[in-house]
Image: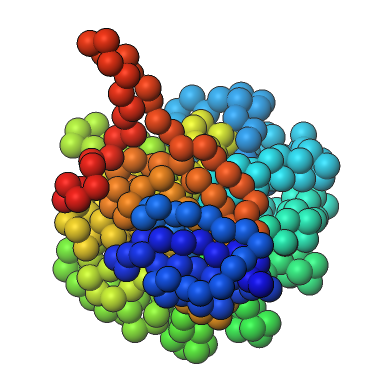
């Protein structure tokens, strides 16, 4: 007997009437009308089953601290960094652990089963590093967590950062981070990229830098990130997060830059909610959107993923860790409204993220981990439109979260009706 069969699912690629059979934590069959019985059966009733959502860029050490010790009044990145600097000395390991654990529960309820979180290593005690390493171990059965060693105060600007970053990697942090645009000079930013990529190459690690998170069109550190990736043979293992300055760059320069990024196989991680909120704050009108060139980068064959970046912290006051909310915002900001474009926005929080994070066993195919989400929607575009209930979240063949369907009951003209915001079957297009 199988552990679990999900019957009559629609898959993100458009296949309908599919049964997903799971055994020992893996998908063992994926076909219409699978024979056999299972300990648990779920009738998907034609609804969408997607691989789990992935948050490819987050800060678990800062999350759920909104208002402590005060609110970011200007709404800028730099006031957020200053505010985080005030908050850091007030935090201890137990408290960071508790907040990050709660965020993981929110993530799982939303069907997000992988998170790449940055952790600030500019604290001599590495308090947040220890807390998040403990969260990664505790939540390992339920959610994949990658931790990035992030020198928030600058790899060279903070004289202690290099030693502490190496110490964090020794403790088991997975990925090398950076923040070249925050160093004191362009030259320091470039030098930090070289050193950090060398550290990653020596240790066989991936790289994910906050890069060019600025409206300054001359912030061109991504060029150096691509160069060092090629020089050190790190293709496919390096991601540039944010890249917001690309929004403001000269088009001629970008026509040279994007092919260099493609040559390096850079992963691109935009954070639509945060980019649209933090960037453009020095503009009057017209006001820039501040998100990187998502459409052009996808068009050039690069993998583009979306991250949530922040939930209720010094930089962002809202959010519930819903990656469909992130994709919905990304779709609007990037004006990705064609059918294939909207599907690419769904991929930016699922399959494209998985490729950038190099997740093993991800996807809906026999042999993959039995991890997936049943949504109250019939296809990825309807999921983006409705940001619907995650009816069931499955991890290694077991249901670990459920949300009841959202249906409104109306009493109009003496009649009872139900509304769930979907068109009747067959009329969806
Ligand atoms: Fe970030």
Residue sitting farthest toward the top: 414
Q: Give coordinates of residue 77: x percent, y percent.
A: 47, 41
Q: Residue at x 65, y 27 (%)?
A: 68
Q: Nearer the viewer, residue 269 or 22?
A: 22
Give whichever of 379, 88 is nearer the camera.
379
Q: Is residue 395 above or below residue 333?
A: below
Q: Is residue 233 left or right of residue 408?
A: right
Q: Is residue 296 above or below residue 121?
A: below
Going by the picture, which residue comes out furthest to the front? Answer: 36
Number of labels in the image equals: 0
Residue located 51% across and 31% down the image: 317
Examine the rendering and report whether any part of residue 139 can be seen: yes
Position of 427 with respect to 419 (left or right) is left
Q: Position of residue 330 (x, y in %)?
A: 32, 49
Q: Residue at x 36, y 55 (%)?
A: 46
Q: Quadrant of the N terminus?
A: bottom right
102 or 285: nearer the viewer: 102
- The quadrant holding residue 83 is top right
Nearest to the observer: residue 106 or residue 369? 369
- 239 with respect to 67 (left or right): left
* Applied colour scheme: rainbow
Taking the spot 33% from the left edge, 73% from the top edge, the residue there is 302
52 horizontally vs 425: left or right: right
Point out residue 138 in the picture as x, y percentages from the top left corner.
Answer: 78, 56
Is residue 217 visible to the viewer in this orientation of the structure? no
Q: Position of residue 72 (x, y in %)?
A: 52, 28
Name the image quarter holding residue 369. Answer: bottom right
């Amino acid at each position: 007997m199988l552990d679990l069969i999900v019957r009559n699912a629609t898959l993100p690629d458009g296949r309908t009437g599919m049964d997903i059979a799971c055994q020992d934590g893996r998908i063992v069959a994926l076909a219409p009308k699978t024979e056999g019985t299972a300990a648990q059966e779920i009738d998907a009733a034609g609804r969408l089953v997607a691989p789990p959502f992935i948050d490819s860029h987050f800060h678990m050490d800062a999350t759920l601290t909104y208002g402590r010790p005060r609110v970011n009044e200007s709404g800028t990145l730099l006031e957020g960094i200053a505010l985080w600097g005030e908050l850091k000395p007030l935090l201890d390991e137990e408290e960071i652990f508790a907040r990050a654990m709660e965020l993981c529960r929110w993530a799982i309820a939303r069907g997000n089963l992988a998170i790449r979180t940055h952790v600030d290593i500019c604290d001599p005690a590495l308090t947040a590093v220890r807390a998040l390493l403990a969260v990664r171990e505790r939540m390992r059965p339920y959610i994949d967590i990658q931790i990035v060693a992030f020198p928030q105060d600058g790899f060279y600007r903070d004289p202690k950062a290099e030693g502490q970053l190496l110490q964090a990697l020794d403790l088991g942090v997975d990925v090398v981070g950076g923040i070249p645009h925050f160093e004191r000079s362009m030259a320091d930013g470039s030098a930090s990229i070289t050193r950090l990529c060398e550290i990653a190459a020596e240790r066989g690690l991936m790289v994910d830098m906050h890069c060019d998170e600025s409206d300054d069109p001359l912030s061109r550190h991504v060029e150096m990130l691509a160069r060092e990736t090629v020089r050190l043979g790190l293709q496919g293992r390096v991601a540039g997060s944010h890249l917001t300055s690309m929004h403001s760059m000269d088009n001629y320069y970008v026509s040279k830059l994007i092919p260099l990024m493609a040559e390096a196989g850079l992963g691109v991680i935009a954070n639509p909610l945060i980019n649209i909120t933090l960037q453009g704050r020095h503009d009057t009108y017209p006001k820039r959107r501040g998100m990187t060139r998502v459409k052009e980068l996808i068009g050039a064959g690069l993998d583009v993923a979306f991250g949530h970046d922040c939930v209720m912290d010094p930089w962002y006051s809202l959010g519930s860790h819903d990656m469909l909310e992130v994709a919905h915002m990304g779709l609007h900001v990037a004006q990705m409204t064609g059918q294939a474009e909207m599907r690419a926005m769904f991929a930016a929080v699922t399959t494209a993220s998985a490729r950038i994070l190099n997740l093993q066993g991800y996807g809906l195919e026999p042999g993959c981990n039995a991890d997936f989400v049943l949504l109250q929607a019939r296809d990825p575009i309807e999921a983006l439109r409705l940001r619907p209930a995650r009816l069931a979240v499955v991890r290694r063949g077991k249901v670990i979260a459920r949300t009841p369907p959202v249906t409104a009951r109306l009493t109009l003209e003496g009649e009872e009706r139900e509304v769930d915001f979907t068109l009747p079957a067959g009329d969806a297009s």
